[in-house]
Image: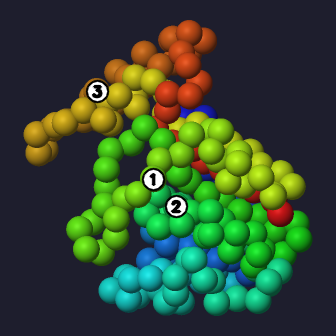
Amino acid sequence: MTKWGKFFDKKIKEIAKENIILDIGGGGGFAKELAKYKKYFTNCQYKSLDFDPETKPDILADAHQLPFESNSIDAIICKAVLEHVQEPQKVVEEIFRVLRPGGKGFVYVPFLYCYHGSGKKYKDYYRFTKDGIEYLFRKFSKIEICSVRGYFETITYLLPYPDKFPINILVSLARFLDKISEKYQSKNQVSGYHIFLIK
């Protein structure tokens, strides 16, 4: 398992131990690589929130205006959402507002990653540097940031490929190159970041 995979695994399992959990941008629930963790969420109140009624979320709402009282949520997941909202700072402020003191958050944002808007459904507005992340989440008492992918694997995902191209072969080679050249690489040329937060 990659270092970012281990980080994701550990932090999602930690989030799952909380009581009231909100998955912002989670569609119908347990999307975006969360399905295999569903068994860990059996003893909590997990709710997905999304603006798109077609995804059939538990809560239909805009992340810019979360329909919850302040300090009422124990944990929040917000994976691959902030690049798609018009005002990410406002969404982060809402996350901070609704989390209880000591509440936990798990966020993923892209940095060097291809455009992935979906026509009229949602746009793709932003990319985030590590410096930007630290500023965006500056009100939180604790922030842990884990980079996702190294230099060569990041480049692999940015290249254009024909349909049905066996990208896994290139990803394996790129991951190997990243491993043997890690100490020579810039730590800032990555695909994105996993972020763990405590209010």
Q: How many marks?
A: 3
Q: Is residue 28 above or below residue 2?
A: below
From the viewer's perspective, tell me whether residue 156 is left or right of residue 182.
Answer: left
Q: Amino acid at mark 3?
A: Leu
Disc 1, disc 2: CB below 8 Å? yes
Q: Give the quadrant of the C terminus.
A: bottom right
Q: Where does label 2 land, which residue?
A: 82
Q: Residues within 10 Å of mark 3 (few under 14, many from 20)?
A: some
From the viewer's perspective, tell me whether residue 102 is left or right of residue 87.
Answer: right
From the viewer's perspective, tell me whether residue 103 is left or right of residue 32.
Answer: right
- The reply to whether residue 39 is visible in this rendering is no
Q: Amino acid at mark 2?
A: Leu
* Residue mark closest to the camera, 3 vs 1: 1
Colour approach in the figure: rainbow
The structure residue drawn at horizontal position 38% and vertical position 89%, both measured from the top left corner, is 53
Q: Amino acid at mark 1?
A: Tyr
Q: Residues within 10 Å of mark 1 (few under 14, many from 20)?
A: some
Please state the horizontal and vertical placement of residue 126, each as a whole percent of the image: 45, 53
Label 2, label 3: how many angstroms apart (C-alpha)?
Answer: 28 Å
Q: Where does label 1 land, which residue?
A: 126
Q: Give the quadrant of the N terminus.
A: top right
- The kind of secondary structure element at disc 3 is helix
Label 3, label 1: how many angstroms apart (C-alpha)?
Answer: 27 Å
Please state the horizontal and vertical placement of residue 122, each as a whole percent of the image: 34, 70
Q: Where does label 3 land, which residue?
A: 170
